[in-house]
Amino acid sequence: MKKSKMGLRGLTLSVLASSLLAALPAWAVDPFTVRDIRVEGLQRVEPGTVFASLPFRIGDQYNDDKGSTAIRALFGLGLFSDVRLQVNGDVLVVILEERPTVADLTFSGIKEFDAEVLKKSLRDIGLTEGRPYDKALADRAEQELKRQYINRSLYAAQVVTTVTPAERNRVSLNFSVTEGDVAKIRDIRIVGNEVFSDSTLRSLFDLSTGGWLTWYTKSDRYSRAKLNADLESLRSYYLTRGYLEFRIDSTQVAIDPGKEDMTITINISEGNRYVVSSVELQGEYLGKEAEFKSLVALRAGEPYNAEDVSTTVKAFTDYFGAFGYAFAQVEATPEIDRVNNRVAFVLRAQPSRRVYVRRINVEGNDRTRDEVIRREFRQLESAWYDSDRIRLSRDRVDRLGFFTQVGVETQPVPGSPDQVDLTLSVVEKPTGNLSLGAGYSQAEKLSIIAGIKQENVFGSGNYLGLDVNTSKFNRQFVLSTTDPYYTADGISRTFDLYYRTTTPFTEQGGDYRLITPGISVRFGVPFTEQDTVFFGIGAEQTEIEPGTNIPAAYLKYATDFGFKSTSVPLTIGWSRDNRDSSLVPTTGRLQRVNGELGIAGDTRYVKLNYQVQQYIPLNKQYTLAFNAEAGWGKGVGGRPFPVFKNFFGGGLGSVRGFDQGTLGPRDITGSFIGGSRKLGLNAEFIAPFPGAGNDRTLRVFGFMDVGNVYGENDKIDFAEMRASVGVGLSWISPIGPLRFAYANPVRKFAGDRIQKFQFQIGTSF
């Protein structure tokens, strides 16, 4: 602490003196009127910043209390390392020593992080270039950097801060990091389990003790968030199997002195297994006790299941909400009989008051128009509150795909106990997509795929897209636009303009092509919330362009009906998809039917295709998947089914183990020409990749495929079905879905082209 000599009325006060001012009368200054205020020591700080912090002005009365307040205020700015007040007569001199500012931040020895990531984390705590330097802040920065490394399981990381003075009262900070080795989980111990084995319980965890693939999954790196999630999985496992009083007593995470090996110990008490003895309803149920009883998931005589309890409470609450009771309270109270290991549940309900929705507000849609969101709502203003319709409204807005977050809040209206307001909040996301990619398969070799899409043009909710594909056998240019609300009732309209060139698979190869330009319009009519029917009409022309090794079937069709064929196809379809994911589904079903009818032009035909996929979760890790697809085509009006409309089979997406597109009829030249009928069945058992934990993006599967393609005059003979079994790998890679399959044909015939190993990028089931 610095002091100036007291002379006349001179006095210098430091920050420490300011806290003792009232207790040291020898330092006291008689009050006086301030004639002038001078500020000394400023380099970068504006004088106005100082004057704005002083509790007095020229002409004001100065006293010791105001001096102490001034010192505290100036220190509170965080800009000065020393503040002194000196009184010379009736002139007050404010002497300041500015803190040095941070000239730059540098890091050395970092490998795990990018420097910009670390700079951002330090910026969040207030340390960045251009800000005043503070030793306490630098210490916090060291701790923040260590925290960042601990989050990556680098517990041995050491951080040393070097402060180097620079010109103009600045300093350069360098954080020298010794990262050390990653701390890995060497053992996970579960203590107290008697009913279930250690291996069974550990299989529930995403954390693991490591394996040959943990370099990819990083599941052997400790994370508190992951451990908490695993503990919840453990708790749920017991509570859904009757162990009502199961508890986790403690969790210890120990690290060895070298900070490289970690041990997790989980102490549990299983308790006894309880069976539900009875379920009783008490309270007010709107005279609909029978309907509420049908919603009870708990069953007398079955083991206690916590999921059944929460499912029942939620079902009751939702059912009350469907009648306008937004604030219904439902409580499930267990009555435990520990002697007989039985538990009885009493479901008490209090519906409270019925309310209606006064107003629906929309927030956060900076780009998307209000009407685009409001037309998805099934809950109306001035109507009774309906939880089912509100939930459906939220889901419909979310399915638009325009927002990263969609939430609905219910807010009581002050002074009106029977009214609520709904606020739908959204967070916009970029809906434009410019893509440039490549795909590779053994059948089609390298293909370039480019596209530009805008799913929400000018915030109108309309779609506009352009796709280009340059694969060897299937090249296309497609321009599409969709208005999802062509009518106020939600009928969609889509225009397609396309140009496709196709070279069917042949054994000899060739340079002939099928060239198909066309245009179409189709409408989607929502018959229910889950079902949509599509119908449309188009016009297209298919040209068989002669070349080497053209199949005889194509040449004959061209000779009989011309090398160019015009068609006016009428299309109709239906779809329903309730899978939990389109990329890595584990539950749900997909169904779709597509029909095409050539009603005018040079072709007359009917073409139908039906596909159903079913996913059945066996548990958290294993899934059964089934796929069935049938296609049928027939010429009408005395004309044959157009050969260029044929179905093809074989390879990925059909019967694996057989070469792509080689199932079914051949013409007299031996070329594979496909057929007018197709049948395929696939079954897969999907499991995590060994060592990958529960990572859904990397899976292995065993499969069995059965199928074939038949000509228009062929009899569908199941004895001629080709079949294969095998194993495969599915990976959602950064460049798209990637699937490898090794198949062994178990039913094949002479002349079949076998290809046991197959792979493709950009395909699914």
Image (tube, helix red, strand yellow):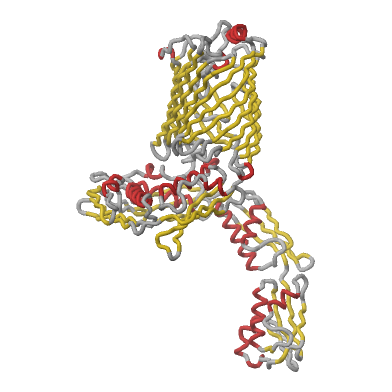
Q: Is residue 750 left or right of residue 107?
A: left
Q: Is residue 238 visible?
A: no
Q: Residue at x 67, y 11 (%)?
A: 547
Q: Is residue 359 visible?
A: yes
Q: Is residue 653 left or right of residue 178?
A: left
Going by the picture, which residue comes out furthest to the top?
Answer: 668
Q: Nearer the viewer, residue 44 or 111?
A: 44
Quadrant where the N terminus sits is bottom right
Give the x, y percent position of residue 642.
Answer: 55, 14
Q: Residue at x 32, y 56 (%)?
A: 331
Q: Quadrant of residue 159?
A: bottom right
Q: Nearer the viewer, residue 414 or 26?
A: 414
Going by the picture, which residue comes out furthest to the right?
Answer: 167
Q: Nearer the viewer, residue 712 or 35?
A: 712
Q: Quadrant of residue 686?
A: top left
Q: Residue at x 37, y 49 (%)?
A: 322
- Whether 385 is drawn above or below 202: the answer is below
- Whether 513 is drawn above or below 418: the answer is above
Give the x, y percent position of residue 567.
Answer: 59, 18
Give the x, y percent position of residue 679.
Answer: 45, 19
- Whether 191 is drawn above or below 584: the answer is below
Number of numbered callouts drawn: 0
Give the x, y percent position of residue 24.
Answer: 62, 90
